[in-house]
Image (cartoon, rainbow, N blue to C red):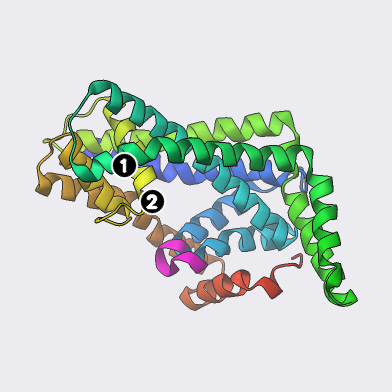
Amino acid sequence: MRGKWLLLSVVTIFATYVGRALRWAVFLKPLKPRPSVLNLLSATVIGFTAIALFGRPGEFVRPYLIARKENVPVTSQFAAWILERIFDLLMALLVFAFALSKVNASGIQVGPTLAWVLATGGRVVAAACTLVLILVLSFRHFSGPIERGITAFLRFLPDAQHQRAEKIVAAFVRGMESTRSDAALLAVFLYSVVEWTLIATCYWGLAHAFPGIQFSLVDVLILMGFVSFGAVVQIPGIGGGMQVVCVLVLTELFAVRLELATSFAMVIWFLTFVAIVPVGLLVALKEGLDWHSLRRIGEAAASPGRTGGAA
């Protein structure tokens, strides 16, 4: 393995965490005009470490920590987390649409499993892009009516619970305020492009690090597109998981040997998912958090009854 290309992959994948912190700062600005990027970066690193260690409950650690560090309602940061997911989904769909167009135009003959991905992919991309557009436009232009409609719907609750629910809904809508600014939307989109450019550079560097893989930039984007799509869609007979999809695409689409494809898939999984763990644990320990504290934070933040307050 070529060390300098591997180093490029490591540097770029760690740079994505900085990009995520800067993008989250845009989400925060309606609530806090000058958020601390260092606070956001430490929460991001710890949050992704929690995801690697605890799975789904770890998703809630980052918005919870950001809310506490920046003294804003926790619910507002769950809204920011949803916005982040929306823009990441949009970028993944765009990359996958590019991959589909290149593969379909090439006329490459693929196996039945990848053929299913090709056949299903176009419909999924169209439906998902439509849903993303509806979500963004809804919160951009109809946040007031949405908030009033939800609170009116919840009037069957007792007064105390209704007032609490009303505060939670208001905080959530405030967390979506960044979608109402043209400048903020443009900034978030540009940060998202930078984020995915760094991810593509990581893939490209890793492809060069393996002597048996010769990828162009287009090949890298094709691989990224299929991996991004396959990681969230259960493929019949295969299932999900980025490692499995990566091996499938490398062997069927690019005729890479199974052993080499498996090695590549495991390294890319390690870089994008596991490599942050030692750094995150060190940052967490510096802030007085340990393994058990992170687990408790994830479980507490995931509890609907405990996410409505401010720091």
Q: Which residues are magenta?
A: 51-57
- The image shows residue 64 at horizontal and vertical percentages of 63, 63
Residue 249 lies in what quarter of the image?
top left
Number of numbered callouts drawn: 2
- Is 55 part of what is drawn in magenta? yes
| Vertical placement of residue 82 versus 219, above or below | below
Residue designated by label 2: 233
- Is 53 part of what is drawn in magenta? yes
**Residue 254 visible:** yes
Three-letter code for the amino acid on which mark 2 is drawn: Val
Q: Badges 2 and 1: C-beta atoms under 8 Å apart?
A: yes
> Who is closer to the viewer here, 257 or 235?
235
Q: Residue furthest top?
A: 105
- The image shows residue 142 at horizontal and vertical percentages of 79, 42
| Vertical placement of residue 198 versus 292, above or below | above
> Who is closer to the viewer here, 283 or 309?
309
* Left or right relative to 77: residue 177: right
Three-letter code for the amino acid on which mark 1 is drawn: Val
Q: CA distance from mark 2 to mark 1?
A: 9 Å
**Residue 195 visible:** no
Residue designated by label 1: 117
Which circle marks residue 165 in the picture? none
Residue for point 29% across, 26% down = 104
> Where does the C terminus fall, quadrant-wise?
bottom right
* Left or right relative to 85: residue 259: left
| Vertical placement of residue 301 versus 197, above or below | below
